[in-house]
Amino acid sequence: MFNKIDHLGIAVKDLKQALGFYQDVLGLEYLGTEVVEEQKVTVAMLAVGESKVELLEPTSEDSPIAKTIEKRGEGVAHVAFEVDDIEAALKKLKDSGVRLIDEVPRIGAGGVKIAFVHPRSTNGVLVELCEKH
Ligand code: ZN
């Protein structure tokens, strides 16, 4: 049901500065940038093998990512797993007593169906599920 780690979400204060490292120094392949209004973030995607790195810069002070940076500083914000069928995955987790942030998928960067699982159920990691596309 879980295929691979699709991407790591990394909270950054300054996307340009972060790209200077991940793109220019590490040489990861830049895939594009988009604003996800609903989550108040600007997202830059970079490819690394079969997985991706997602750099998340808040677009406003009340963005959830802004709050994450305020509380814990920059760093890994979430780990995203690719699943074939996100509704089936959510049902299975819910039936297993796992605490979900999103019981119904929402649309994330790239128009992909995503849902978050509460860190309290995942040993402290904010887990994102994203449907294969
Ligand atoms: Zn993500």
Image (tube, grey):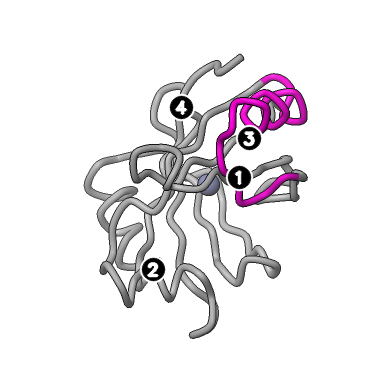
Task: Give how far across and how far down residue 113 sits, in percent.
Answer: 73, 40
- Under mark 4, the amino acid is Ile
Task: Give how far across and how far down residue 2 sits, in percent.
Answer: 55, 18
On-image quarter of the N terminus? top right
Q: Earlier in the sequence, mark 1 or mark 4?
A: 4
Residue pointed to by mark 4: 5
Q: Is residue 116 magenta?
A: no
Left or right side of 117 for 24? left
Contact, mark 2 vs mark 3 (Cβ under 8 Å): no
Residue pointed to by mark 3: 130
| Numbered tag placed on residue 68 in the rendering | 2
Tell me the crowding category of disc 2: few under 14, some 14 to 19, or many 20 or more residues within 10 angstroms, Cα based: some
Contact, mark 2 vs mark 4 (Cβ under 8 Å): no
Residue depicted at x 26% and y 69%: 73
- Looking at the rendering, which quadrant does residue 129 occupy? top right
Q: Earlier in the sequence, mark 2 or mark 1?
A: 2
- Under mark 2, the amino acid is Thr
Choose mark 2 or mark 1, whichever is in front: 1
Front residue of 35/123: it is: 123
Residue depicted at x 34% and y 71%: 69
Magenta residues?
84-103
- Under mark 1, the amino acid is Leu
Element class at badge 4: strand
- Looking at the rendering, which quadrant does residue 67 occupy? bottom left
Q: Earlier in the sequence, mark 4 or mark 3?
A: 4
| Numbered tag placed on residue 25 in the rendering | none
Tell me the crowding category of disc 3: few under 14, some 14 to 19, or many 20 or more residues within 10 angstroms, Cα based: many
Q: Earlier in the sequence, mark 3 or mark 1?
A: 1
Is ligand 1 less than 8 Å from the beta carbon at label 2?
A: no
- Under mark 3, the amino acid is Cys
Residue pointed to by mark 1: 100
Is 74 situated above or below 131? below
